[in-house]
Image (tube, rainbow, N blue to C red):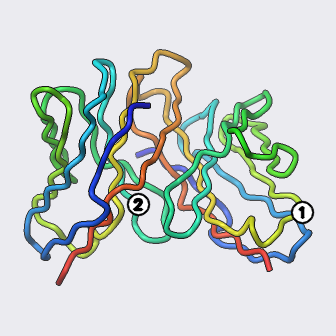
């Protein structure tokens, strides 16, 4: 999997928007951009993913640069429950039996200040 | 939505004993499950790929005789840490994907098992 680069940590005030950046300059045309987060002492959970267009879901928005070499995960209103490590992962389109593994980097530890 | 469940959530065992961790897909069938290990303040590292009805595939550096994986049904994979030592103390996490969702949907993770070997 292609490599991603994220800041080690970020802070946000509660109820303010948070923009978590991810650089992936070596992304290939068949790589999806996935975001997962891991709350303390829990397994990771899916947040969002996209290929070229910006994506929105109930948890977050994903803004993808036009050249796809970077992306930004946007939490519109941070809450204390959003404090977690956020992982940006590239995953090649898989045309196999329907399952795949993920390669986790160090991620960004988000702290939310009350 | 689809859920992956792990049991137990935490376990303490004595050195030299074996510990079994279960991973279940609750509302979908998973021919493949993945086992990760996470040491404190580090990221998840893939240990092995569990394949239903066949042998598991281990990542480089992971001892297959120490970390026994059994995937006897489409909804259950087990990881047994044999002859556990304190350095095996870690957070073990399993993962699976619902194949009904298409080629590039999300992976689901268990809640993790905190193993402490004393």
Which residue corresponds to mark 2?
A: A38
* Residue farthest to the top, as pictured: A95
Q: Nearer the viewer, residue B54 or B63?
A: B63
In which chain is the residue bearing label 2?
A
Q: State left or right for residue A30 relative to residue A113.
A: right
Q: Residue at x 63, y 69 (%)?
A: B114
Q: State left or right for residue A67 relative to residue B105.
A: left
Q: State left or right for residue B55 relative to residue A47.
A: right
Residue A109 is tagged as none
Which residue corresponds to mark 1?
A: B83
Q: Position of residue B20 (x, y in %)?
A: 79, 59
Q: State the SS at label 1.
A: loop
Q: Position of residue A78 (x, y in %)?
A: 16, 68
Mark 1 neighbour class, 10 Å CA radius: few under 14, some 14 to 19, many 20 or more: some
Q: Residue at x 36, y 34 (%)?
A: A90
Q: Residue at x 49, y 68 (%)?
A: B41
Location of residue B17 by image quarter: bottom right
């Amino acid at each position: 999997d292609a490599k991603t680069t994220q800041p080690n940590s970020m802070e946000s005030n509660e109820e303010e928007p948070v923009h978590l950046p991810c650089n992936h300059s070596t992304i290939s045309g068949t790589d999806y951009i996935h975001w997962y987060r891991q709350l303390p002492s829990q397994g990771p959970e899916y947040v969002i993913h996209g290929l070229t267009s910006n994506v929105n879901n109930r948890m977050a928005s994903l803004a993808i640069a036009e050249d796809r070499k970077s992306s930004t995960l946007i939490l519109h209103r941070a809450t204390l429950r959003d404090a977690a490590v956020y992982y940006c992962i590239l995953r090649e389109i898989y045309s196999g039996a329907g399952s795949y593994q993920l390669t986790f980097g160090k991620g960004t530890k988000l702290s939310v200040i009350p | 939505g689809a859920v992956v469940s792990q049991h137990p959530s935490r376990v303490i065992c004595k050195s030299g004993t074996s510990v079994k961790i279960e991973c279940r897909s609750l509302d979908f069938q998973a021919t493949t499950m993945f086992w990760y290990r996470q040491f404190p303040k580090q990221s998840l590292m893939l240990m092995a790929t569990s394949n239903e009805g066949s042998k598991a595939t281990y990542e480089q550096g992971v001892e297959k005789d120490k970390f026994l994986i059994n995937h006897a049904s489409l909804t259950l994979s087990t990881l047994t840490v044999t002859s556990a030592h304190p350095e095996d103390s870690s957070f073990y996490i399993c993962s699976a994907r619902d194949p009904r969702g298409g080629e590039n949907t999300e992976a689901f993770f268990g809640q993790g098992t905190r193993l402490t070997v004393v």
